[in-house]
Image (cartoon, grey):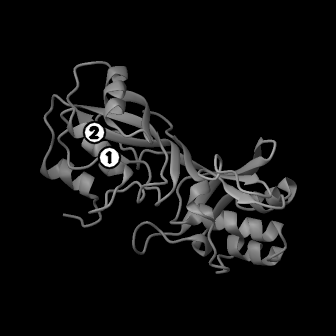
Amino acid sequence: MSSNLSVSELSERENPVPDTCERYKFTVSYDGTLYWGFQRQKGRKTIQSEIEAALTTLGWEETGIISAGRTDSGVHAEGQVFSAKLSWKHSPEALRAALNARLPEDISVKDVERVPDNFHARYDAFSRTYRYRIYFAEVRDPLRDRFRLRLWPESDLKTLNQAAHILLGEHDFRAFGSPPRKNGTTVRRVIASGWIPEDRDEIAFEIEANGFLYHMVRRMVFLQLQWATDRIDWKTWEDAVLNAKPTHPGIAPAKGLSLYRVRYEKL
C-alpha cells in the first residue's frame, strides 16, 4: 500500500464505513489563535481534533476527516472545507446546528451539503484563496491585533500592487516555501493576486492559486512589504518570483492570514 496516502485515506480503504452513510461537505470558519494548526497532532490542540471529537458524538466512525488545506499554527479560516461520511437521518441544516452545538466558540460550521461519495475535499478543489490582513496605526489596537498585522507608517497600495502583479501565472515558487510532500514540485499557478482596501485604514493581500507551499503566502507578504518600504530593491523581488532565487528568509506573522475560500468547479 502506498505510503503517500494520508491517514484519512488509508482508513477509508481498511475500515470502510457502512453503505448507509452519506458523504457531506462542510464549510467551516475558525479563529486559529489558540490552536496548533488544522491537522491533528498528538498531544496538541488542533482544529481537526476538535471537529472530529464533535463528529464522534453524532455517530461518525471514520478515522479522519479530509480537508481542503492544512492551515498552520495561528492561521485562521473563513472558508475551510472538509468532508466526512456520516449516517444522519435529518437535514444538512440540522447537522450544521448539531455540530455547532458541540464545537467550541472559536470554530463554526457555516454550511453543510450532501455530495457524491467520490467527492474529495482536497483533490477536487479547483483553487484556494488566502487573505492576509493589515491595519495601519501608530499604536496597537487590541480589538484588531488578533486577526491583523499592525504597521506604521502606511504602505502605498499602488506600490504593493506593482509587486503583487508579477505573481500572476505559473512560476516556480521555491523561494517562498517548501512543498507539502517530500520531493514534490514547487511550481504553482497563481490565478489572482492583489492588494485591496478593506476599511479606511485596513488593507488585505488576496491571492488565489491552484495550490500553495508551506509558508508561501506569509513569505510573499513579508517580501512585498520589504519592497514597499525600500528595504529590498525591485530586482531582489523579481528574482525571487520569476527566477526562484532564494532571498531574505523573513516571514509575516501567522495572525494576519486566513484561508478565505476554496473553489470547486463542479460536484
Instruction: Provide residue 219's location: percent of width, then percent of height.
Output: 63, 68
Mark 2 surroundings within 10 Å by alpha-carbon count, few (fewer than 14), some (14 through 19), many (20 or more)? some
The residue lying at 52 percent from left, 56 percent from top is 211
| Residue 115 visible at all | no
The residue lying at 32 percent from left, 57 percent from top is 40
Dot 2 and dot 1 residues touching (CB under 8 Å): yes
- Residue 221 is tagged as none
Image check: 198 left or right of 98? right
The residue lying at 60 percent from left, 50 percent from top is 147
Amino acid type assigned to the residue bearing label 1 in the image: Glu
Instruction: Provide residue 99's location: percent of width, then percent of height.
Output: 32, 32
Can you identify the residue that label 2 sits on?
Answer: 54
Can you identify the residue that label 1 sits on?
Answer: 50
Q: Nearer the viewer, residue 63 or 149?
A: 149
Q: Quadrant of residue 166?
A: bottom right
Q: Quadrant of residue 138?
A: bottom right
Mark 1 surroundings within 10 Å by alpha-carbon count, few (fewer than 14), some (14 through 19), many (20 or more)? some
Q: Nearer the viewer, residue 223 or 99?
A: 99
